Image: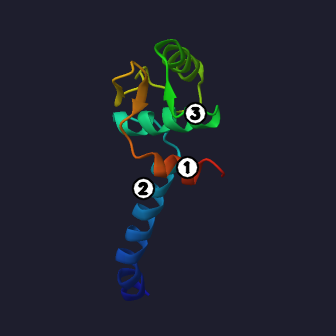
């Protein structure tokens, strides 16, 4: 009987470890720490409203709207990785192809 328990003990310990790691990973709140997800999120929000480029006022309004939502994405980071065009409008530095593919979902 003891040899049987000893044989299964490593597998049981490994299984318990995997279950503990899974529970830990699944109970953590999503917080984004890099600017890329925020840049993509802002691109999607702008495209959803029908804008590829934004005026400074539209950019500030979008930043304020995204900052007040508490959907697990907000952590005080502002919209990043947008650049000003020669005409003074702002456009995302991210490839718009991604947003065009995701937006219909």
Q: Residue at x 43, y 22 (%)?
A: 89
For residue 29, say whether it is visible: no
Mark 1–mark 2 Cα distance, whole angstroms, equals 36 Å
Q: Residue at x 54, y 33 (%)?
A: 72
Tag shown at residue 6: none
Mark 2–mark 3 Cα distance, whole angstroms, equals 34 Å
Between discs 1 and 2, the one toward the N terminus? 2
Q: Residue at x 46, y 39 (%)?
A: 40
Between discs 2 and 3, the one toward the N terminus? 2
SS assignment at label 1:
helix
Q: Quadrant of residue 101?
A: bottom right
For residue 35, say whether it is visible: yes
Camera-side residue: 3 or 9? 9
SS assignment at label 2:
helix
Q: Position of residue 56 (x, y in %)?
A: 46, 14
Q: Residue beneath label 1, please?
A: 100
**Colour option used:** rainbow
Q: Residue beneath label 2, please?
A: 21
Q: Position of residue 94 (x, y in %)?
A: 38, 42
Mark 1–mark 3 Cα distance, whole angstroms, equals 11 Å
Q: Residue at x 39, y 21 (%)?
A: 87
Q: Pointer 2: residues within 10 angstroms few (<14), some, or many (20+)?
A: few
Q: Residue beneath label 3, please?
A: 45
Query: What is the quadrant of the N terminus in the image?
Result: bottom left
Cβ atoms at labels 1 and 3 below 8 Å apart: no
Q: Residue furthest front?
A: 87
Q: Which one is closest to the eye, mark 1 or mark 2?
A: 1
């Amino acid at each position: 009987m003891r040899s049987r328990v000893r044989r299964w003990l490593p597998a049981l310990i490994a299984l318990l470890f995997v279950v503990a790691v899974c529970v830990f990973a699944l109970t953590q709140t999503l917080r984004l720490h890099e600017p890329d997800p925020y840049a993509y999120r802002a691109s999607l929000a702008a495209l959803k409203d029908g804008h590829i480029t934004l005026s400074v006022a539209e950019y500030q309004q979008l930043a304020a709207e995204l900052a007040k939502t508490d959907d697990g994405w907000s952590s005080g980071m502002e919209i990043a990785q947008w650049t000003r065009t020669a005409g003074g409008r702002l456009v995302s530095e991210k490839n718009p192809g991604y947003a065009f593919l995701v937006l219909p979902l």
